[in-house]
Structures are given as C-alpha cells and as structure tokens.
Image (spheres, rainbow, N blue to C red):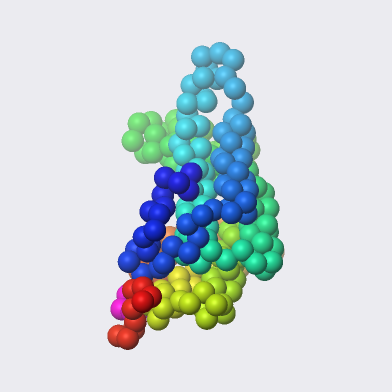
Amino acid sequence: MRQLVKKKGEPMYGIFTARGRDASRLEQLSDCVFALAITMSLLSTQAPRNFDELTLFISDVVPFTLSMVAVMWIWHGHYQFFMRYGLRDMRIIVLNTFMMLIVLFFIYPLKFLSTWLVSYFTLLAKALLISNEYFRELNQMGTQMIPWNDMPELMIIYDCGFLSIYITLVLMYRHAIKNSDPLNLSEAEIHATKSIIAHYTGIVAIGLISLFIALLGFLIDWEFSGLFAGVIYALIGPVSYFIGRKYDKPPLNSKSDHA
C-alpha cells in the first residue's frame, strides 16, 4: 500500500524530508490492521442467499464506502507521520499499538452509524420527494435499528473512538516536536508540525464538544442530543480552514530542506 504513495528519495510536499521511506515492521503491521478493519466492515454484511438479500447487500455499498473512506483517512494521517519523521521508539510503538486497538474497535460503531445515516436520509428523501408513506418506514427505523433515545449512547461510543484516534495523533506529533534536534528538523518542518498539531487539536476540541452534548443528552434523557452531537462534526471543515490560514505562511528564515 505504502509503495504506491511514497516518492523514494524526494522530500514530501517540498517541506518534509521523507525520513521514513523504508517501512519498518511497525508500519507493515499497522497496514495489516487497517486492511483487517476494512475487511471486518465488509464481512459485517451477511452474504446474499437470494435476490432480495442481494439487493440489500448492494444497498450496503454506500455505508461500506463511507466506513472505508474514514479508515483510509486515518491511515493517511498515520502514513504521513511515519513518512515525515520515521520515529519508531518505544513511545511511538505504544501510541501506535493503542491506535491500532481503537481502529479495530472503532470499525463496527462506524459501520453501524454509516448504515443508519444512509438509511435514514434515503427514506427521508423518498418521503419528501416520492410519497408520504415512507414516513411510516422512517418512524419504524426507531424500533428496527436504534431508538432515538439510544442515539446519545451511540454517539458517546463513536466520540470516544474518534477522540482516542486524534488524541493519539496529537501525542505522536508532539513527540516529534520534542525530537526536533535528533531528527534535524528544519524551521519549515517545525512550523508545519506545529500547524498539524493545531489542526488535530481543533478536531479533538470538536469531538469533545460532541461528546459533551451526547453525555448531556444521556443524563437528562434528551433523545435528539445524538443528532446535534453528530451535526457538530460539520465544524471540522471551517475550523481546519481557519487554522490553516493562521499557519499557511512558514517562518521567513525557514528552509524547505537541509544542506
């Protein structure tokens, strides 16, 4: 997988020197875990035995795709870290192991949430555009998949997995900053690393807000808190944009690579 992405011998993005060009057993094991998570997401759907089940299996393509995109997004962040810094000390091994554990745990809640979202908004679109009779099926979803009053608990599970992954990434990048001298990071690389930490910290802050809303809804029995806890993730785009604007200019005395 990594061989298709990396450009051997070239700095990444014109700023980072590719210190992790040669993947170690740690990255190879991690790739196997990510591949296993994607496989688990696919196998969570029962193999079709008749045409009706085949139709249902095909309808699961969109939730599976959403889950796979989310896993690959995490993998890409993981890949970038090891390509940029090549760190493989004990702290990174521990943090990486924890992340792999969360990825494997996270895949089923992620697939369930993706399936629910696709089913809900598909029925909602049919009800609004085709026939009001679909509102009856929409109401039945509350008993077939998950009642609205259980949505806060689902979001708590999702938030905990989401936060665990991105807090781990923050800790990994902070460890890279602490090792800037041994890694011989340039000023531009240090600036970019701080930008990445700020970006991931902003994502963690949004996850914490979502978790707070979900916990509040669970405690006071506010069934629609799960919906608001999910919608709050739409802030990731704007927050990432503003953080990027703040860090888009590297230091004037920075260099893209080392002499």
The outermost residue toward the front is 259
State the residue in front, 132 or 123.
123
Residue at 52 percent across and 48 percent down: it is 71
Vertical position of residue 82 compared to residue 39: above or below: below
The outermost residue toward the top is 50
Vertical position of residue 20 compared to residue 247: above or below: above
Q: Is residue 1 visible?
A: yes
- Residue 145, position as x, y percentages in the image: 61, 38
Residue at 36 percent across and 73 percent down: it is 257
State the residue in front, 151 or 204.
204
The outermost residue toward the bottom is 253
State the residue in front, 25 or 199.
25
* Residue 247 is a magenta residue: yes
Residue at 52 percent across and 25 percent down: it is 56
Left of 29 or right of it: where is 139? left
Q: Main secondary structure of the magenta part?
A: loop
Q: Which residues are magenta?
A: 246-250
Q: Quadrant of the C terminus?
A: bottom left
- Residue 148, position as x, y percentages in the image: 60, 48
Vertical position of residue 43 compared to residue 176: above or below: above
Vertical position of residue 70 compared to residue 165: above or below: above
State the residue in front, 11 or 100.
11
- Residue 108, position as x, y percentages in the image: 63, 43
Q: Is residue 217 visible?
A: no
* Residue 214 is a magenta residue: no
- Residue 95, position as x, y percentages in the image: 65, 63
Residue at 45 percent across and 70 percent down: it is 196
Instruction: Count the labels in the image.
Output: 0
